[in-house]
Image: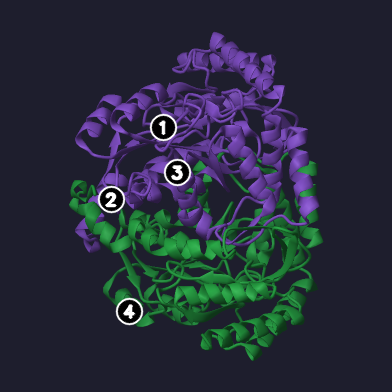
Chain colours: A green, B purple
Amino acid sequence: MSDDHQSPTAAAVQRSYRNTLSVIDFAERNLAAAEQEGLMALYAKPSKDRSVFLPTVSHDRKVIDFVRCSYLGLDNHPRILEGAVQAVRQHNALHWSCARTRLNFGFLGELEEALSDLFAARVITYTTVLAANMGALPLLASGHLTENKRPTIVFDRLAHATLAFHKPVAACETQVETIAHNDLNTLEDICRRNDRVAYVCDGAYSMGGSAPIADLLTLQDRYGLFLYIDDAHGISLFGTSGEGFARSQLGPNLGERTIIAASLGKGFGASGGLLMLGTSRQEQLFRRFSVAYAFSASLNLAAIGAAMASQSLHRTEELKFRQDALARRIIAFDRKVASEQAGSTLPIRTIEFGDENSAIRAARRILNKGFFTSVIFFPTIAKDKAGLRICVTASHTMEDIEGLSRAIREAREEQGSN
Amino acid sequence: MSDDHQSPTAAAVQRSYRNTLSVIDFAERNLAAAEQEGLMALYAKPSKDRSVFLPTVSHDRKVIDFVRCSYLGLDNHPRILEGAVQAVRQHNALHWSCARTRLNFGFLGELEEALSDLFAARVITYTTVLAANMGALPLLASGHLTENKRPTIVFDRLAHATLAFHKPVAACETQVETIAHNDLNTLEDICRRNDRVAYVCDGAYSMGGSAPIADLLTLQDRYGLFLYIDDAHGISLFGTSGEGFARSQLGPNLGERTIIAASLGKGFGASGGLLMLGTSRQEQLFRRFSVAYAFSASLNLAAIGAAMASQSLHRTEELKFRQDALARRIIAFDRKVASEQAGSTLPIRTIEFGDENSAIRAARRILNKGFFTSVIFFPTIAKDKAGLRICVTASHTMEDIEGLSRAIREAREEQGSN
């Protein structure tokens, strides 16, 4: 070990933020077992709606997928695919290799205007939510979003990995704290003790549950709390324009103290990520200084065309139709299977099976019956809370939901009889 | 300022790695001026080869672009565009919203096999080089790539922004140092004093110049130095398979101590990024634990189709034809315009104009004559070294090169007469 070479600073930061070595040593056994059982690292062919073809030795086997997060079933919508194809055809280009600070497809400017209008915010797109988050945190830490005063940045312990990753980077510029999931009492304490505070959390959490947006807005009113909300899993599912879980609970103006990150994939059905900003000064800062904007490339034209088609679909009655179809399927699932999230209008359910081996065995049994689910364990979730994640979507049939529910119940019974 | 709230650790790391606040305060004036002059944050329509249409009040104005990095002119190659379109059409999908640790397009597996074969390495693709780099640095810092012993990580001072960004993250796990550009004496000193050392650098640097690959390999032989080389700007330009500036200087096997990051855009002509790894154990680690792989999505199908078409083109004589065409254009440029990089076979040239205002004025004069160049200043390059960056490509005509050269000379003369 070269730990003796570490400066005290590095060693101290290491203890507080990360230890890739120990995470890997712990997690790898389970990942290998899940791969061995054919539950992870799969390669498949798309099929209709929520089904995919998994290759087997003898033939391609069709399974119903509850892993992908296309909650409204838009990811193979013909108009979105046609948007992708036509954008490439009409521009005779797919990708420009240059920073967005220099040169952009005009069509990307049109897309961002359309999205800004749709979501009533200043929207900047990114190739991924990962890239959007990476650009945002140093700007937040710098104080430029909070009257040039560096805020104390408070992370929810379950904030997405692509946010938590940057704690050491943020800690280079300001105080960083991590609090228990949705622990608003501690957050309020920190607000009382500090001049400027920014809270980094998910809107809809990727492993179920959500941020208490209304309570956070109360803290914002009371203490000027800055909110950075990654709503990748909430976009499109709520709001008359599909503005998402977080944005739909905010007023007509996002204001100066709230930024929402979201996906152009997932519920939105295209490809990429975005930020919703509240002021033109924020937009200017992000367009000049966010690292992915200044030192990486933009969405490719297929993604731009798909997103343009999807934002157009978001303005039709098809959006509400699909939001309602999703809601009915979530209710149908909850009637059949108990879960921590039962009753929530969000589409993610986790089913605990306890230890990792039990979870892997259950997922394998369920896959044998034709349903592909996500087996989840540390570091994705807490140790000893291993289980399954189910993503319900609007284009699962009621028979899919019924079949999965039965397979989960049978896996539970089989577990009990072991 | 909330600096008084900072822990000593955060304050110490801050001083060593970054200060977004002061970078922004310094750079913003120049960025605003360059935008005001219509040199940055432009939106344009693609035209044939290296020309783009810039919108003006009265009409769309065609200019020859030397900003984009499509060094072989492949980014609008009909076969690459057709690959993008057909991939979407044939799979009836553009994007799957799920982590690559779970489910992948089978076609992406085929692409990675083809690229592995082409570049004689284990290739993993990413949505961007930014995402590839972000995933790699914590794995490097963890020691899993260096016999489970954490290496001292040494960054070249000019390593790309998407690498330097993660110094604080790497410093959470191991000792991190930054040395002067290409300072191999200091690097060798560090190798002598430390058990395990990893060096992080660019192959072809984005602002001109390159890493001394042969000398680095000598240090690797002598001290077991691990090399992480971002060759985004070198890919496709060199080697019989277009394996790039760095890979073409290495042996038939990459070995256990070299990782190369590269672009699927730029010279390659498609969209995305990749890593070339030397061992199957490295591949397994990256496919299980790199953050973009486990917590973000894959290339979309248009990008996969484009890359598949481009790797196929890389196996034809068209590659050499385009590499040679690029070489002739670089020589032609060097005959006309003096630059620090004159004589190099790499396609990036920087022309110093001194202070930022002079550089902006020169770029504007050159744009008036129909040639779009990148005006560069801090933090992209060192303070008071402001100037222009020129990306020569294989599909610039000799007239384009001649016209740009004349415009640069005239801008120099006009500067002299001010």
As shown in the figure, which amino acid type bears the numbered disc 2? Gln
Classify 10 Å Cα crowding around label 3: few (below 14), some (14-19), many (20 and above).
some
- Per the model, the C-alpha gap separating discs 4 and 2 is 26 Å
Q: Which mark is residue A186?
A: 4
Question: Residue A288 in the image: x percent, y percent?
Answer: 49, 46
Question: Which is nearer the N-term, disc 3 or disc 1?
Answer: 3
Q: Are marks 3 and 4 on the same chain?
A: no
Mark 2 — on which chain does it sit?
B
Classify 10 Å Cα crowding around label 1: few (below 14), some (14-19), many (20 and above).
few
Give me the residue at 77% from left, 35% from top.
B79
Q: Which mark is residue B162?
A: 3
Mark 1 — on which chain does it sit?
B
Q: Are marks 1 and 4 in contact (CB under 8 Å)?
A: no
Task: Say which quarter of the image contains residue A272.
Answer: bottom right
Viewer-nearest residue: A108 or A417: A417
Give the left or right position of residue B348, taking residue B163 as reference.
Answer: right
Give the left or right position of residue A123, taking residue A291 as reference.
Answer: right
Q: Which mark is residue B14?
A: 2
**Against B351, is A254 above or below?**
below
Question: Residue A301 in the image: x percent, y percent?
Answer: 70, 46
**Against B245, is B15 above or below?**
below
Determine whether the residue tagged by mark 4 lies in a helix, strand or loop.
helix
For marks 3 and 2, give the one nearer the viewer: 3
- Per the model, the C-alpha gap separating discs 3 and 4 is 34 Å
Give the left or right position of residue B194, taking residue A301 as reference.
Answer: left
- Per the model, the C-alpha gap separating discs 1 and 4 is 43 Å
Viewer-nearest residue: A165 or A1: A1
As shown in the figure, which amino acid type bears the numbered disc 1? Ile
Classify 10 Å Cα crowding around label 4: few (below 14), some (14-19), many (20 and above).
some
